[in-house]
Image: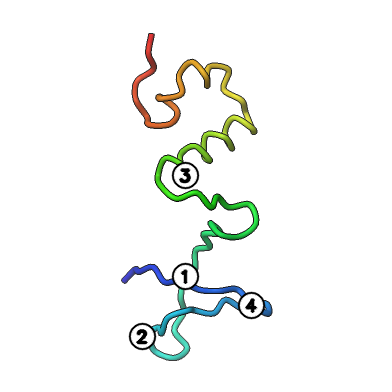
């Protein structure tokens, strides 16, 4: 079963903000989404997340046609000719 919970990192430990209904000593998989911490985007919405992803791509490899085909990179639409 998969579900999302909110947690806080304090004193070197990840602590859930809400009560977890799991048996003691259960092994859990934790995925860190640092949207409110260092390096994360604090802007809400899918567009902001997509734009942040494009920025990371452009910063690393710099598609030469990013400005021309922004919708393609942002929304996955076919490139305009």
| Crowdedness near tag 4: few (<14), some (14–19) or many (≥20) residues, C-alpha within 10 Å | few
Q: Mark 4 or mark 1: name the one nearer the start of the chain.
A: 4
Q: Is residue 80 above or below residue 49?
A: above
Left or right, 32 with reference to 19: right
Please, what secondary structure does the residue beneath circle 3 have? helix
Q: Which mark is residue 21?
A: 2
Secondary structure beneath dot 2 equals loop
Q: Badge 1, how many Cα within 10 Å: few under 14, some, many 20+?
A: few
Circles 2, 4 touching at the beta carbon (< 8 Å): no
The image's mark for residue 29 is: 1
Residue at 39% x, 89% y: name it. 23
Instruction: List the residue tagged with mark 4.
Output: 10
Which of label 4 and label 1 is nearer to you? 4
**Sequence-first disc among 2 and 3:** 2
Mark number displayed over residue 49:
3
Of mark 2 and mark 4, the one earlier in the sequence is 4
Mark closest to the chain's N terminus, 3 or 1 = 1
Contact between labelled residues 2 and 1, with CB atoms less than 8 Å apart:
no
Alpha carbon distance from label 2 to label 4: 21 Å
Residue drawn 38% across the image and 85% down it: 22
The answer for how far apart the CA atoms under marks 4 and 3 are is 26 Å
Disc 4/disc 1 C-alpha distance (Å)? 19 Å
Give the camera-side residue of 75 and 25: 75
Could you tell me residue 19's position as x and y percent?
A: 41, 85
Instruction: Work out which quarter of the rendered image holds the C terminus and state it.
Output: top left
Q: Nearer the viewer, mark 2 or mark 4?
A: 4
Viewer-side residue, 45 vs 25? 45
Picture coordinates of residue 68, whole percent (x, y):
48, 15
Residue farthest top in this picture: 81
Instruction: Identify the residue at horizontal 59%, vertical 30% (top origin).
Output: 58
Q: Residue furthest bottom?
A: 24
SS for callout 4: strand
């Amino acid at each position: 079963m998969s579900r999302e919970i909110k947690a806080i990192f304090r004193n070197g430990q990840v602590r859930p903000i809400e009560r977890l209904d799991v048996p003691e000593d259960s092994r859990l998989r934790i995925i860190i989404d640092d949207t409110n911490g260092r390096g994360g985007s604090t802007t809400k919405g899918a567009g902001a997340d997509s734009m942040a992803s494009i920025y990371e791509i452009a910063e690393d490899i710099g598609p030469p046609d990013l400005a021309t085909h922004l919708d393609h990179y942002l929304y996955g639409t076919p490139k305009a000719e």
